[in-house]
Amino acid sequence: MTYATARKTLADEIPVIDITPLRDGSDPDGVAHALHAASTGLGFIYVRGHGIPEAAIDAARAAAYAFFHADPAQKEEVRAGSNHRGWLAQGGAKMQDGAKADLKESFIWGFQDADGVTPDDHPLRGNNRWPGFQPELEEAAMTYFSAAHEVAHHLMRGFACGLGLEEGFFLKTADKPLSRGSFVYYPPQDASHGADQFGVGPHTDFGVLTVLCQDDVGGLQVQDVTGEWIEAPPIPGTLLVNVADLLARWTDGAYKSTPHRVVNASGRERMSLVVAYDPNPETRIDPREVFGPEHGAAEEPITCGDYLVWRFGKAFTYGKS
């Protein structure tokens, strides 16, 4: 038995973009041009100059490990329900019909206001489920979420400018976002499971934009435009950002949402810190608002909220229980 393999990535195959000039306003157009070029290509981008303090990353990662190392009976207290908040145990998700269940575990939360409350106005959100046995998790998770969410906002401004739109185009309805944070734990994967077993199986991300902070373990693999799988190794000091399905739909396929998967062949634990950026549920996803009313879009308009309900319903078994 063996692992699913991928070739080593060539230089600049996944571009590295410093977004400092976008964040500080010194050269937003230059960064926007680079983001646009990367998004119409592979759709994966290493981001430098993101501004998230290393201490916030370290605290989030330490809190995540403490949670996943806890007794399963304790984690059971915050098991995820249909609103996609809480602990998703191993085997709770698979990315394709007929595939083996993923080996990963996740802890999922989302946007909340200063009082810790999330609007209960959509099937995929509601108050976050923080574990009583680990009170420090909430602060670490929300600090990281807020910082990564700010990065996503900067990137969405850059994408808008790269498309020749007003910089706030993608952020017009983003005050109560459907964005989700997740700590994703990948146990060491034994080769005896075979090449069809994954930490997370081949998939594209559902929403608008994914902001990923990898650790130093590696294992992420991306499918290039020819269909070949390539490695997306950790690069110190960077985040890895990828276009997701709703941004691809919003741009009528101009921006690419690329399949990816995880194979943890390292013999070590692996942790990913993920923020999936999505705007308010009522946000209308319509390429004609991007390219003009005469544009012949491949898909009919849909709201962000309706689209995510459909996609989550296909992928996660716990929502059906």
Image (cartoon, helix red, strand yellow):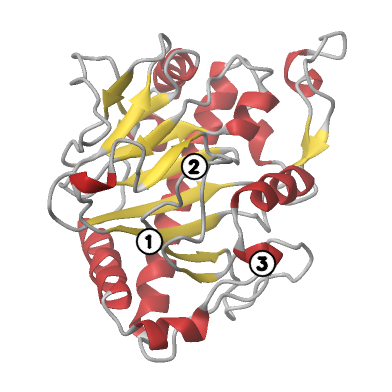
Establish if 178 lies above or below 212.
below
Q: Residues within 10 Å of mark 1 (few under 14, many from 20)?
A: many
Q: How many tags in the picture?
A: 3
Q: Amino acid at mark 1?
A: Tyr
Identify the mark at residue 99; answer none if there is no mark.
Answer: 2
Query: Residue drawn 55% across and 39% down?
Result: 96
Please state which of residues 5 and 98 is positioned toward the viewer in this rendering.
98
288 horizontally vs 149: left or right: right
Establish if 92 lies above or below 253.
below
Query: Residue drawn 81% across and 9% down?
Result: 295
Q: Quadrant of the N terminus?
A: top left
The residue where tag 1 is placed is: 144
In whole angstroms, how far apart are the C-alphas of marks 3 and 1? 21 Å
Q: Would you say residue 14 is visible in this rendering?
A: yes
Q: Amino acid at mark 3?
A: Asn
Establish if 206 lies above or below 259.
below
Q: Quadrant of the C terminus?
A: bottom right
Image location (x, y in percent) of residue 21: 35, 29
Identify the mark at residue 221; answer none if there is no mark.
Answer: none
Image location (x, y in percent) of residue 186: 29, 56
Establish if 296 lies above or below 107.
above
Query: Residue drawn 28% across and 15% down?
Result: 13
Q: Residue 85 lies in what quarter of the image?
A: bottom right
Q: Residues within 10 Å of mark 2 (few under 14, many from 20)?
A: few
In whole angstroms, how far apart are the C-alphas of marks 2 and 1? 32 Å
Mark 3 or mark 2, which has the lower sequence index?
Answer: 3
Identify the mark at residue 83; answer none if there is no mark.
Answer: 3
Query: Nearer the viewer's eye, disc 3 or disc 2?
Result: 2
Q: Residues within 10 Å of mark 3 (few under 14, many from 20)?
A: some
Query: Nearer the viewer's eye, disc 3 or disc 1?
Result: 3
Q: Secondary structure at mark 2?
A: loop
The reply to whether discs 3 and 2 touch (Cβ–Cβ < 8 Å) is: no
